[in-house]
Image (tube, grey):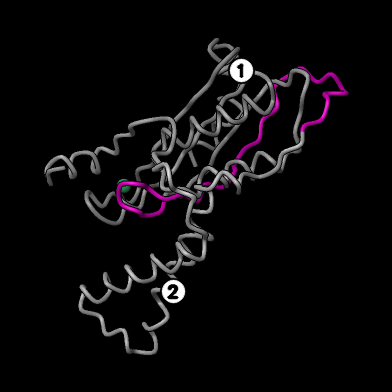
Amino acid sequence: MDIEKIEIIGDQHLPTSLETPLHPNAFDPSDDEKIETIQYHFQKIMEALGLDLSDDSLSGTPYRFAKMYVKELFYGLNPKNRPKISTFSNKYGYKKMLVEKDINIDSSCEHHFLPIIGKAHIGYIPKGKVIGLSKINRLVDYYSHRPQVQERLCLQIMKDLQQTLGTEDVIVVVNAEHLCVSSRGIKDKNSTTTTMEYGGVFEDSIYRNEFLALVADDVKR
Ligand SMILES: [Zn+2]
């Protein structure tokens, strides 16, 4: 890939697919093996920058960095780490909109590996199944902890909820700050990006507007 094309894809944050692009052997090595590989290469990066790794403050950084990548920031790459979500039958027969607002987004942009920080707001209309409220937060956390593009993050959360809840009637709004926009490049400290995905009844603007009215103040924040 030529350098010019690399710059264009990164700066415009172009997503390429719904699925996170993974190579077929992505989970053949264990987490510990991945940590060892990343530790080795990150040490090379630090050395290339001219840093003296014999310094006490720096010597442990390649290991800390590697462990953070595999176990924390990108734990959501591995399908084994998807939160277990048990569904319950909708005993109350609640058929109106349920909205969960202000769910933390702690993600990373796949073009620059810099943080994406923001909030997700999610609505759905239960059919036969409901899930514990905190499970929505856990699902958002899981999909956030991969190298991401905001559009794909939004879509992955929606698709999973639609499948888990057995209904198309799901809407997801994500509002986030990208550090690759605020701390480098254009260095805009104030702009945020909003993305929205919806299906089922939310195709109808009446439902969409009802949801947006409920989360409006929170999206602006
Ligand atoms: Zn970026």
Measuring from the top left, give residue 212's x and y in whole percent: 55, 25
Residue 49's place in the image compared with 153, above or below, is below
Residue extending farthest to the right is 91
The residue that appears at 12% across and 46% down in the rendered structure is 3
Tag 2 residue: 63
| Mark 2 crowdedness (10 Å alpha carbons): few <14, some 14-19, many ≥20 | some
What amino acid does circle 2 point to? Answer: Tyr
Residue 218 occupies quadrant: top right
Residue 141's place in the image compared with 17, above or below, is below
Residue 169 vs residue 113: left or right? right
* Residue 106 drawn in magenta: yes
Residue 136's place in the image compared with 127, above or below, is below
Q: Start and end of the magenta stretch? A: 87-115
| Mark 1 crowdedness (10 Å alpha carbons): few <14, some 14-19, many ≥20 | many
Q: Secondary structure at mark 2?
A: helix
Quadrant of image for the N terminus: top left
The residue that appears at 41% across and 50% down in the rendered structure is 108
